[in-house]
């Protein structure tokens, strides 16, 4: 831009840091391997990238990452009254016993969302019982616990209050996850609310994105979010949604970290600590992008069924 040439040197230099790719050890991957494109795994399993950890909504590590440096965080995705035994607890204990470094686990995925839109849809009392049986015992083994990850809807707060009431002191998470699909200001305000409601927990933003926007708006959201997360000391980890090709994205093609051809988009490359690739994400032909509020927003969690 011609005009910037007229700016004095010092102000221009002071603007530079925001224009450079940032690196951060807080970054992780929320990821479900693509059965259609198994080769895509190699992009994430990179010893040279910024990624330090991942979760895959499941109990056990992703096979193709078994030799990687990425730290695996097991998740108990859902729970129901019909569950028997303690398969999650057993699986995590077995990993610890075999020498895997399990420092954290995550609780339920969008329990306040309905199954139809990708949330686990768990009644707060059922979740409390499952937590006490399968998650809380890990605390004694030194594992830090992630609270249930509610949607960004205001109902999430009500669900969490009910959950902790049913727990009656028996659920003691260390981390409060945040899911957010919307603009940056809304996200910052939502995180502020969660921090105020749960001041003794660290925040992990385990799914976030700005659905169905043009590329520049999407990239601006991405930039503002990373800068904010990296600066906030009590936001200790984050994982961008997401690690999939643009043509299967159900939050709009521009959000994706991979193009329809499996190449890193600008956002994908920035997230890994690299420079812009200029690879432009394209959607599937004929897809109609409509951002219609919470019912669509929670559907993002159901993406894994498409991969
Ligand atoms: C295990 O992972 C945690 C969290 O990333 C890390 O702080 C710790 O140093 C790791 N321990 C070992 C033995 O690698
Ligand atoms: C971070 O959390 C601690 C408590 O865990 C609190 O004392 C501190 O004020 C918080 N810092 C910020 C910047 O919010
Ligand atoms: C986002 O940040 C990158 C550098 O990390 C920069 O090149 C790009 O112009 C920024 N985009 C917007 C819309 O702010």
Image (cartoon, helix red, strand yellow):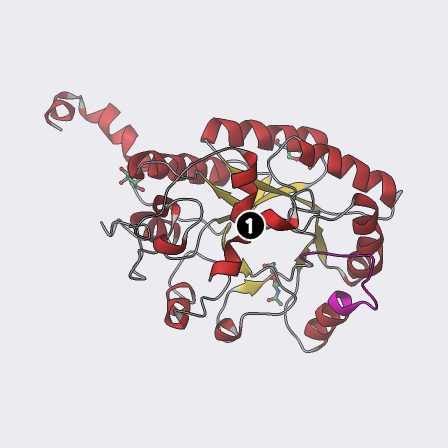
What x and y, as percent, mark residue 263? 29, 60
Residue picked out by circle 1: 301
Q: Is residue 79 magenta?
A: yes
Where is 9 relative to 36, above or below? above
Q: Quadrant of residue 169?
A: top right
Identify the residue shown where x is 43% and y is 39%.
211
Where is 299 relative to 80, above or below? above
What x and y, as percent, mark residue 30? 51, 55
Q: Which residues are magenta?
A: 77-89
Pick the quarter of the image with the N terminus: top left
Residue found at the far left of this picture:
2
Q: Is residue 78 left or right of residue 125?
A: left
Identify the residue shown where x is 34% and y is 44%.
254
Identify the residue shown where x is 60% and y is 29%.
192
Q: Is residue 238 visible?
A: no
Q: Is residue 106 visible?
A: yes
What x and y, as percent, mark residue 195? 65, 32
Identify the residue shown where x is 49% and y is 71%.
65
Camera-side residue of 104 and 294: 294
Camera-side residue of 157 and 198: 157
Where is 133 relative to 96, above or below? above
Q: Which image quadrant shows ligand 1?
A: bottom right
Where is 219 relative to 13, above or below? below
Residue found at the far front of this picture:
286
Residue found at the far right of this picture:
168
What x and y, as percent, mark residue 120? 67, 51
For label 1, being within 8 Å of ligand 1 is answered no
User: What is the magenta segment's predominant secondary structure?
Assistant: loop
């Amino acid at each position: 831009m011609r005009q910037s040439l007229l700016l004095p040197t010092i102000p221009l230099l002071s603007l530079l840091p925001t224009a450079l790719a940032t690196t951060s050890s807080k970054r992780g991957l929320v990821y479900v391997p693509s059965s259609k494109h198994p080769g895509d795994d190699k992009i994430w399993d990179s010893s040279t990238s910024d990624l330090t950890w991942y979760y895959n909504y499941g109990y056990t590590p992703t096979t193709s990452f078994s030799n990687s440096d990425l730290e695996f965080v097991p998740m108990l995705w859902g729970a129901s009254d019909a569950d028997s035994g303690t398969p999650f607890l057993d699986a995590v204990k077995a990993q610890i016993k075999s020498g895997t470094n399990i420092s954290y686990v995550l609780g339920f995925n969008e329990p306040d969302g309905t199954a139809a839109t990708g949330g686990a849809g768990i009644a707060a009392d059922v979740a409390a019982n499952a937590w006490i049986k399968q998650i809380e015992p890990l605390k004694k083994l030194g594992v830090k616990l992630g609270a249930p990850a509610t949607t960004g809807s205001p109902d999430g707060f009500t669900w969490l209050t009910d959950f902790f009431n049913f727990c009656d002191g028996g659920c003691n998470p260390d981390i409060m996850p945040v899911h957010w699909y919307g603009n940056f200001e809304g996200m910052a305000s939502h995180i502020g609310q969660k921090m105020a409601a749960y001041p003794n927990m660290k925040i992990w933003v385990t799914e976030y994105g700005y659905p169905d926007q043009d590329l520049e708006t999407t990239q601006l959201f991405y930039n503002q979010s990373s800068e904010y997360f990296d600066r906030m000391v009590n936001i200790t980890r984050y994982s961008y949604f997401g690690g999939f090709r643009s043509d299967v994205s159900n939050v709009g093609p521009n959000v994706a970290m991979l193009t329809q051809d499996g190449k890193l988009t600008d956002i994908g490359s920035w997230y890994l600590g690299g420079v812009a690739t200029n690879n432009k994400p394209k959607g599937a032909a004929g897809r109609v992008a409509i951002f219609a509020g919470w019912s669509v927003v929670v559907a993002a969690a159901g993406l894994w069924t498409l991969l």
